[in-house]
Image: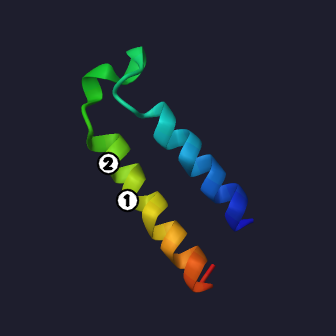
Amino acid sequence: MSMILLIILILILVGALPTWGHSRNWGYGPSGGLGLVVIILIVLLLMGRI
């Protein structure tokens, strides 16, 4: 379950990068926030909390 969640969050992160046409005006806010969530999930996964 946690691996599926991690894969989905990584795909969302790639979709929110400001290089794509639909998200060019968003800036780095969405991708930075999602990147932080992915890093927290990776740390929790490595610690065995998830």
Picture coordinates of residue 47 (x, y %)?
56, 84
The Cα–Cα distance between marks 2 and 1, rounded to whole angstroms, is 6 Å
Give the residue type that dot 2 points to.
Gly
Q: Seen in the image, is 31 located left or right of residue 3?
A: left
Query: Horizontally, is 31 left or right of 4 in the view?
Result: left
Given contact means CB atoms under 8 Å apart, are the residues at marks 2 and 1 in contact?
yes
Residue at image mark 1 = 36
How many tags in the picture?
Answer: 2
Residue placed at 40% from the left, 52% from the top?
Answer: 35
Measured as percent of width and height from the top left, residue 45 is found at 59, 75
Please identify the quadrant where the C terminus is shown: bottom right
Q: Quadrant of the N terminus?
A: bottom right
Callout 1 amino acid: Leu
**Residue at 70% across / 62% down in the picture?**
3
**Residue at image mark 2:** 32
Q: Residue at 55% x, 50% y: name it.
A: 9
- Mark 1 is surrounded, within 10 Å at the Cα level, by few (under 14), some (14 to 19) or many (20 or more) other residues, namely few
